[in-house]
Amino acid sequence: MATSTEKGIAGSLDWLKWLVVVALLAGGVYGNWYYQDESLLVRVVALITLAIVSALIAVQTERGRGIWSLMKEARIEVRRVVWPTNQETTQTTLVVIVLVFIFALILWGLDSLLGWAISSIIG
């Protein structure tokens, strides 16, 4: 029962966390503009730091945890994919190029034939 109360309180404060995230990101954009005369390296490091802090705060929300979970599951699925070998990729690419060339010739022939037929009808 205590966990449901804690979830209710934490869930009700999610809007505040998102507000902090938006405020940090907006502050970063404004700070980047305001300090445009400063070194680019300093501004980039500051923006990356703000982005990391914002992401850490966002992950503490219910929706943020869901997104993080989805990203972890997607990474696991990508590891399960059987990727083609270099030879398979090359062969498939060559087949596609040959077929595109054949269809281009067919369409060129049809265009020429129809153009000749239309020009002979029109005169």
Image (cartoon, grey):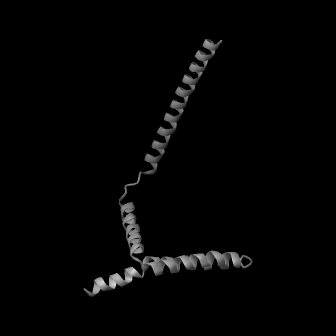
Residue that sits furthest to the left in the current view: 1
* Residue at x 72%, y 79% (from the top left corner): 38
Above or below for 68 versus 100: below
**Which residue is situated farthest in the bottom direction here?**
2
> Observer-nearest residue: 54 or 110?
54
Question: Can you give x and y, in whole percent of width and height, for residue 48 in the image?
Answer: 58, 76
Picture quarter with the N terminus: bottom left
Is residue 24 left or right of 8 when viewed as pictured? right
From the viewer's perspective, is 9 left or right of 23? left
Q: Closest to the observer: 2 or 74?
A: 2
Q: Quadrant of the C terminus?
A: top right
Q: Image point 38% across, 79% down: which residue?
A: 11
Left or right, residue 23 beside residue 62:
right
The mark total stands at 0
Residue at 49% across, 76% down: 55
Figure quadrant of residue 75: bottom left
Q: Please state the horizontal and vertical placement of residue 111, each as a whole percent of the image.
A: 57, 24
Q: Residue furthest right?
A: 37
Q: Position of residue 90 (x, y in %)?
A: 48, 45
Asked whether, in this view, residue 11 is left or right of residue 91, the answer is left
Place residue 41 in its image quadrant: bottom right
Measuring from the top left, give residue 18's x and y in whole percent.
48, 77
